[in-house]
């Protein structure tokens, strides 16, 4: 059962706000957006279209979750970046920061490549679920510790295409 949590209108407004803040902070600087596959793709596409037209886009993929609902605690790089980020301004784009494990690992990895700056934008954050303390520079919505799907987020690869975000409850 799906219980709507954040509407598509709320997402649109939040994207406008986040894009304004990012545009201001990076004025005059060329930015690389790094989407973390697959959940971030919808957020990245909609955010990027609100940013100046010379941003570069790359993707990486890590896996910390199997097909289910809970983290295995193991982070593996499944696809690395194509772009060399040395001396570049990098903004990691996440759909959700949950325990913080994925992000902490990615930031540590990318920092070794000496970017000019390294920041993070996440549409969602679950502060109650955090076990790894890691800074998220731009947060769209803080949400309760419930399992959410939609707008890129999945359960066993389903529901990513929902245009809104919903809490997924087990079938009654
Ligand atoms: C999700 C999400 C983050 C990570 C957050 O990805 O996109 O990358 O989990 O969880 P954490 O803070 O507990 O590490 P997932 O591994 O489910 O892959 P997906 O984006 O392909 O659905």
Image: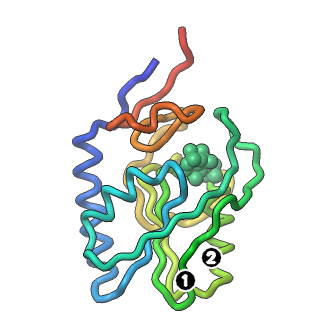
Up the image or down, 8 lies above or below 94; here it is above
Residue name at image x 57 percent, y 74 percent: 82
Query: Considering the numbered disc 1 on the image, is that residue within a helix, a strand or a loop?
Result: loop
Mark 2 crowdedness (10 Å alpha carbons): few <14, some 14-19, many ≥20: some
C-alpha distance separating marks 2 and 1: 8 Å
x, y percentage for residue 81? 59, 71
41 relative position to 155: left or right: left
Q: Quadrant of the C terminus?
A: top right
Return the disc, 2 or 1, that comes first in the chain's sequence.
Answer: 1
121 relative position to 12: left or right: right
Q: Nearer the viewer, mark 2 or mark 1?
A: 1
Residue name at image x 70 percent, y 42 percent: 71
Q: Residue furthest top?
A: 172
Up the image or down, 162 lies above or below 168; here it is below
- The answer to whether mark 1 is within 8 Å of ligand 1 is no
x, y percentage for residue 161? 40, 37
Query: Considering the numbered disc 2 on the image, is that residue within a helix, a strand or a loop?
Result: helix
x, y percentage for residue 69? 64, 33
Frontmost residue, 141 versus 30: 30
Residue name at image x 36 percent, y 28 percent: 4
What residue sits right under mark 1 in the picture?
85
- Tell me if I can see residue 135 in this picture: yes
Frontmost residue, 20 versus 36: 36
Up the image or down, 105 lies above or below 101; here it is below
x, y percentage for residue 10? 26, 43
Residue name at image x 44 percent, y 63 percent: 121
Q: Residue furthest front?
A: 82
Mark 1 crowdedness (10 Å alpha carbons): few <14, some 14-19, many ≥20: some
What residue sits right under mark 2 in the picture?
110
Callout 2 touching callout 1 (CB < 8 Å):
yes
């Amino acid at each position: 059962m799906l219980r709507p949590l954040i509407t598509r209108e709320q997402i649109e407004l939040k994207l406008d706000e986040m894009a304004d803040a990012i545009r201001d902070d990076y004025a005059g600087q060329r930015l690389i957006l790094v989407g973390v596959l697959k959940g971030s793709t919808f957020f990245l596409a909609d955010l990027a279209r609100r940013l100046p037209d010379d941003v570069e886009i790359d993707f990486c993929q890590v896996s910390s979750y199997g097909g289910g609902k809970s983290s295995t605690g193991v982070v593996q790089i499944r696809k690395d970046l194509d772009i060399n980020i040395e001396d570049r301004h990098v903004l990691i784009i996440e759909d959700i920061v949950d325990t913080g494990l994925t992000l902490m690992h990615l930031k540590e990895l990318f920092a070794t490549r000496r970017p000019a700056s390294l920041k993070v934008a996440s549409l969602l954050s679950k502060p109650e679920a955090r076990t790894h303390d890691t800074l998220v520079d731009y947060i769209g919505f803080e949400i309760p510790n419930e399992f959410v799907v939609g707008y890129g987020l999945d359960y066993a690869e389903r529901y990513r295409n929902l245009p809104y975000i919903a809490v997924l409850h087990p079938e009654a």
